[in-house]
Image (spheres, helix red, strand yellow):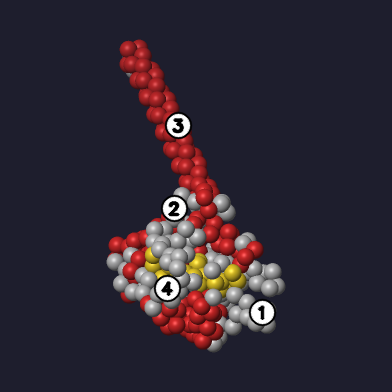
Amino acid sequence: MSITETRMTKAELRAAARAESARIQAEQAAREARQKRLLWGGLGALLAVLIGVVLAVTQPWRGDANAVPNFDVVPMDQVVNTPANTTPEGGFALTAAGGTTAYINPDIPTLDIYFDYMCPFCRAFEDVNLENLMSMVADNEANVVMHPVSILDRFTPRTRFSTRALAAAGWIANYAPDSFLAFHEAMFQNQPSEAGGDMSSARMAELARAAGVPANVAAGIEDGTATQTFGQWVVSLTARNVNDPALRGPDGGFGTPTIALDGVYWLGPDGRPGDWTNPDNLTALVAAARNS
């Protein structure tokens, strides 16, 4: 082997060494890049999970039409969204055609009925008295005003059926007032049990459509928009009614159904809450008020 050949071989070795070094450096750089991508990808995934947890805790209604935001109790004069076709006191004043209105005839007595869609006694009250109540409205003998109170949310603490159902009623009053009473009755006829019962927003929307509510309005109940819009109204209205001394029973508490005549809690002659289990009693109460 000549000197030239030996020197060329060494040159080739140096070139090969440089090439191998460059290859190793490139592989190392590629590994580091992959590790960085994995690290940042993992951190991104962890951050997404943490954000999801925070939203699930603080804004549970997002992505779940059956969940309800944690509305703060604020005074009614601070509530931004209130349904149309409801009275200034937040009631559904029934019309002879089964709708709801904001109008109260000042020349006749007013029956105020405070109800919760989860309350079995409220359903029983309407089973017994609704026909007579509607007769009073049709004959212009009395204003009949239904007042929503969601005092039974404790039976459905995550989905808060009472608040969702009453927000749906407010939604219908706002956008499809002529269908109010049909929906109202359907909610009682399909009332979930206090012992673990509930009703999805999709089912409420189904009942709304069956009651004559347009499909586009019922869709706002199904996707939770009704709750987001009028849930605060329900919560604040409930707090105001529950804490109104004029609506306390003789034991000092508030319950449903509560019945008041012209703003005065209805007491029977024995000093106990008026007996609504006999439909003639409310008829007699209104007749006495008209003749006084």
Judged by depth in the image, the label closer to the viewer, 2 or 1, is 1
Tell me the number on the disc at residue 81. Answer: 2
At label 1, counting other C-alpha atoms closer than 10 Å, the crowd grade (few under 14, some 14-19, many 20 or more) is few
Q: Secondary structure at mark 2?
A: loop
Q: Which residue is mark 3?
A: 28
Name the front one of labels 4 and 1: 1
Q: Earlier in the sequence, mark 4 or mark 2?
A: 2
Q: Residue at x 68, y 82 (%)?
A: 270
- Residue at the image point whose x is 32% and y is 12% from the top: 4
The residue that label 4 is drawn on is 184
Residue 227 position within the rendered picture, expressed as x and y whole percent measured from the top left: 45, 59
Q: Are marks 4 and 1 in contact (CB under 8 Å)?
A: no
Query: Does residue 85 appear in the picture of this structure?
Result: yes
Q: Amino acid at mark 2?
A: Asn
Neighbor class of circle 4 (other Cα within 10 Å; few <14, some 14-19, many 20+) is many
Q: Nearer the viewer, residue 176 or 231?
A: 176
Report the label total: 4
Task: Please tell me which residue lies in front, 68 or 106.
Answer: 106
- Disc 1 element: loop
Indicate the amino acid at tag 3.
Gln
> Which three-letter amino acid code belongs to the residue tagged 1?
Arg
Amino acid type, residue under disc 4 in the picture = His
Residue 13 visible, this angle? no
Sequence-wise, which precedes: disc 2 or disc 1? 2
| Residue 272, disc | 1
In percent of the image, x 58 and y 62: which residue is there? 241
